[in-house]
Amino acid sequence: MTSPNPLLETWNTSFGLAPFDRISDDDFAPALDTALAAHAAEIAAIAQNPETPDFANTIEALEAAGRQLDQVLGVFFTVAGADSNPAREAMQRDFSPKLSAHSSAIASNKALFARIDAVWNSRDSLDLTDEQARVLMLTHRGFVRSGAALEGAEDTRLQEIKARLALLGTQFTQNLLADERSWFMELTEADLEGLPDFVVDAARAAGAEKGVDGPVVTLSRSLITPFLQSSPRRDLRERAHRAWVSRGANGGETDNRDIAAEILKLRQERATLLGYANFAEYKLETEMAKTPQAVRDLLMSVWAPAKAQAEADSAILQDMMRADGINDDLAPWDWHYYSAKRRAAEHDLDEAALKPYFQLDRMIEASFACAHRLFGLEFKPLDVPLYHPDCRAWEVTRNGAHVAVFIGDYFARGSKRSGAWCSAMRSQAKFPQAQAPVVINVCNFAKSDPALLSYDDARTLFHEFGHALHQMLSDVTYESVSGTSVARDFVELPSQLYEHWLEVPEVLGEYATHARTGEAMPKELLDKVLGAATYDMGFQTVEYVASALVDLAFHDEGVPEDPMAKQAEVLARIGMPEAIVMRHATPHFAHVFAGDGYSSGYYSYMWSEVMDADAFEAFEDAGGPFDPERAAALEEHILSTGGSADAAELYVAFRGRLPGVEALLKGRGLAA
């Protein structure tokens, strides 16, 4: 007799959590095959239903289908992204075309689409709720945009394109992870001179993780950034920076440049098959921005003041470097170092002195405390099996009632892809039965004892927890519009808005306590931190907007034969400062090439920031950052509603109007 596969069981565990202590890599492939077959059978039953199509037997039936598949993939993609290994990477490559073929088969099921189309055409007589009408519209639009209305050779070609894109996205991600995992720079004891203790400790911990007898610098952002900020050795900074910006462009099997070129060609062909002039027009149709020109207008309205500020800052840093006796032009590997020295001088802020006040545990407490004051949430630690020893879990309740399970996976490791993200292993829904969400925040903070964060790390923690609140406070009927299932240029609003609470003086005053003494951050230091909140914003805005403009150009200015040449063309056109590089150059631009998520959509962080700056002003204009009426309105109109209504309508319901760019420029310190 064979043992039952835990991935296919109904989980009679605490809160229905995945039984990670019973799941092995050997379970994934057979579970996926079984779940795919079960879902295919459910889809066939819906498509072949002899009854007249209606909302219940077609749209709701689709919503109810695929639960077993969701369960399997919820676990697999969690561990594949946060704790990968060769077996899981091989499975990703194997699963990607299978999943693409499965979704393509559903999208191209003519009998199924005929039923959806029939319900759509009879929608005015169905007496649907607002949410049901929204789900019907999104379902119908999604099928049309997936090619359900195509026939013959065009239909076949679209399915081939989608399968190939899925495989290329997986390869892009794994190549990037391989480059990040394989590179490290060993440091001698002499090389540690000038580095603050927290960087030395992180480098030693990274060396131990790499199996090296001594400290190393890796390509983890939480290590390489403070190294670039603090190392007086220009040669080592250059070596580390060149490794950082060349990820995915080192030649050989892990080079992503040809993959990026093929992805762009296939996306354009896909858009053409579906009747769009280019991929950007196809992609932006469903977003708040709607058109490529609207995106370009926003980005260029911010580019000019940001570039002017960055160039003024560059001149100051250049003078500082020459004062150190280096008669050379300011280079990208110099910016972090001299900018950190300038910040220390102008704001009397020293990262080494500041960092002990940003303990990971205290920042987690701060994010929880703000959620309690704003939304009444409580967090209780859970002792449950998780996928890695670094993970922690909490039960989230309100007025004693269960709301969600929240999992935090905070430390960098070689098995985890870079960056930070939020995902739901299970999303909130009321149909076909009530289910509470299981939400995960994944970060890449340097591991130390105690774990200390930079101020940027702390902002990242709050940012991802904002996404988590969007998932946890969701209160909709259908899972397809639950939580973060919203327009891409709206999804960053809750996360970027939540960052503002880190900057509230009373929050830092209570939770920014020294790791050794336990004392609160002195008011003088607190004032300096808040006073420096917009420091170097010209640099940060330039590196971001340049990336967003390159992404847009890739998808609405014709398919480039050589994406690297197109990247250079765009940067030259906008006058990119020589001492600043794109935040994400093409070969490691995972937002754009690891999948379609942010393709033509990297701008969305700034689109959302226009709203988050304006939304936080609403709190400040009312009773302050914890104003209960504004908090209730934020939950009612944005955090609880998911994608159950149009994003612009939701924002207007919260704020009374749509925002302009003024609050963003003011918040970034770029206003004239």
Image (spheres, rainbow, N blue to C red):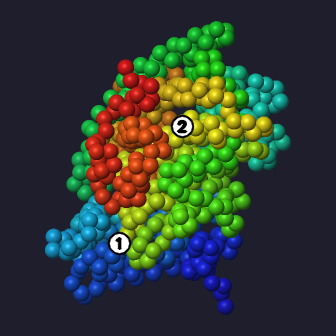
Snapshot quadrant of residue 639: bottom left
Q: In this orientation, which residue lies closer to the viewer: 499 or 408?
A: 499
Image location (x, y in percent) of residue 395: 60, 64
Question: What residue sits 40% from the left and 47% below the top?
Answer: 630
Query: Which percent across, then down, holds residue 656?
Result: 28, 45
Residue 138 position, x and y percent, is: 29, 63
Foreground: disc 2 or disc 1: 2
Q: What's the residue at 75%, 44% (across, down)?
A: 450
Q: Which residue was labeled with disc 2?
A: 504
Residue hosting label 1:
106
The quadrant the N terminus occupies is: bottom right
Q: Along the line of sight, which residue is nearer the eye, 622 or 579?
A: 622
Q: Residues within 10 Å of mark 1 (few under 14, many from 20)?
A: many
Decide if residue 370 is on the left or right side of residue 132.
right
Q: Which mark is residue 227?
A: none
The residue depicted at 79 percent of the width and 25 percent of the height is: 193
Q: Amino acid at mark 2?
A: Val
State the residue at coordinates (45%, 20%).
309
Quadrant in which the C terminus is drawn: top left
Kind of element beneath mark 2:
loop
Compare marks 2 and 1 and give the one earlier in the sequence.
1
On the image, the x and y values in percent for residue 527 come to 59, 26
Q: Quadrant of residue 163?
A: bottom left
**Farthest bottom residue?**
1
For this view, does 147 lie left or right of residue 95? left
Q: Residues within 10 Å of mark 2 (few under 14, many from 20)?
A: some
353, above or below 613, in the image: above
Q: Amino acid at mark 1?
A: Ile
